[in-house]
Amino acid sequence: MIWSFPDPTRTAILANGQSYSFGDLQQASRHMAAQLLANQSDLNERRVAFMVEPGFDYVRVQWGIWLAGGVGVPLCTTHPLPAIQYVLDDTGADVLVVSPAFANLLRDDATRRHIRFIVLGEDETSLETLLPTLTPDRRAMILYTSGTTNLPKGVVTTHANLDAQTATLLKAWSYSTCDHALCVLPLHHVHGIVNVVSCTLRAGGTVEFLSNFSAQAVFDWFRANQLPNRDRVFMAVPTIYFKLIAHFDTLPPDEQTAITGAMRACRLMVSGSAALPVSVMERWEAISGHRLLERYGMTEIGMAISNPYMGERRAGHIGQPLPGVGIRLVDDAGLDVQDDASPGESTPGDASPGEILVKGDNVFLEYWQRPDATEAAFTPDGWFRTGDVAVLETGYYRILGRNSTDIIKSGGYKISALEIEEVLRTHPLVADCSVVGLPNDEWGELVAAALVLQHPNTPLDTAQLSTWLREQLPAYKVPRRFLALPDLPRNAMGKVTKNDLKPMFND
């Protein structure tokens, strides 16, 4: 996963007011690898956990682990200590690398575990050593699932998996040496690690990191010109776009005009990691001049389906299979409900829903030390079961939701929670919402909606809202219970944690 670059003088990373070239990054990564090896010839897939702020240090540590033959385990910098301890326990990491800011938090824990503890900037020396030769099939990284339905599982990817994930996107999204990407995403998920950092650097482009996220800082980045003749690339989750829109609407007209003009010059804007409300897509397009490219991926597969870089980006759809990625939709019996259709084709079975199955070099190797879970995640012929349900509509896939949380089985119907959420967001009193199924003896599951109101102090007339919904949806899809909340529970990537939401209806 470490690539050679023809021009080591080009800018690779901008962070904390400093510029680092590819030559700087490669040298610092080799020094990190030498320190990790400590006179060994090869880490031989030992797990190295690291808790480092986004920026140059993060990348040099990650690359150093790979160069030394280790398996990188990035820790979330905002997780509480018990969540970090869970990952350290589960991976059995015997090396822990941290930024100085996290030294006091984790030093005692490392001592108790008798694992090697490295604090960046403390006792670091510029070492050189002979590095091991790595084969593509070796394990490279363990990322953890969000754990919204069970304990988080460690997703193991090999160097070959990461190479496939980046190579596919470089082609599909036309990365180049001219790209200048802003990273505002957490770096313990594939969205930030692969799509933003790894793809941009592999193409020879520049990644810039914000020390602290703010909507104003993002808009300032669009307007800045520290790297002229570069193509700006921006990727975020729907909640970030929602925050940017809200901040934009507070700005004076002249500043709005300047920001809009700057954003129109951006090469690519992408949304992912959660369903993008059509209302947010349309509002962002009006502000920025960009129709967001929505795609589909997950920890286990990287990216698998995407709207096209060139061509129609269809609102409410995740697009078409990426090159080299096989996609199937299957019913509860595992039978195909729809053969893959060419873009633009319409076939009689287009509307049949099914679980998305994925096969390709991008698909992960295993769940760490969970052979039963790994076996259950694959069909006998090697297709990965995503747990997501979709339909194919004239060549474009549309997500209906996850089997476990977004597909509600009520009164004999299979109902997409995402569909109801899209309709609710168009109501003038609703700022955001989430729809869940609550256990019910009569219906199996009762459709229920949690709402964040535009004006929280204004009482919600649920009877009036139900009447309005019946004009938009079949009666069996209309929620039977409503709950007004100041905000929705979310994980680090902005996804609503519906299993945390469901008990709130009992309060």
Image: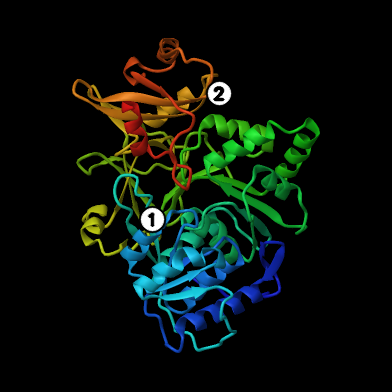
Residue 136 placement (x, y as % from top left): 41, 73
Q: Residue at x 41, y 31 (%)?
A: 418
**Is 219 positioned to the left or the right of 422 in the image?**
right
Q: Residue at x 33, y 42 (%)?
A: 339
Residue 456 placement (x, y as % from top left): 53, 22
Q: Dividing the picture into quarters, in which one does residue 399 lie? A: top left
Q: Is residue 11 visible?
A: yes
Front residue (pair 448, 474)? 448
Please tell me whether mark 1 sits on a helix, a strand or a loop: helix
**Is 235 positioned to the left or the right of 189 in the image?**
right
**280, above or below 55, in the image:** above
**23, above or below 152, in the image:** below
Q: Name the N-terminal-most of marks 1 and 2.
A: 1
**Is 43 positioned to the left or the right of 35 in the image?**
left
**426, above or below 7, in the image:** above
Local packing at callout 2 (Cα closer than 10 Å; few below 14, some 14-19, many 20+) is some
Q: Residue at x 63, y 35 (%)?
A: 245
Front residue (pair 329, 481)? 481
Q: Amino acid at mark 1?
A: Ala
Count of all numbered marks drawn on residues in the image: 2
Q: Which mark is residue 454?
A: 2
Please tell me whether mark 2 sits on a helix, a strand or a loop: loop
Front residue (pair 106, 148)? 106
- For label 1, the residue is 83
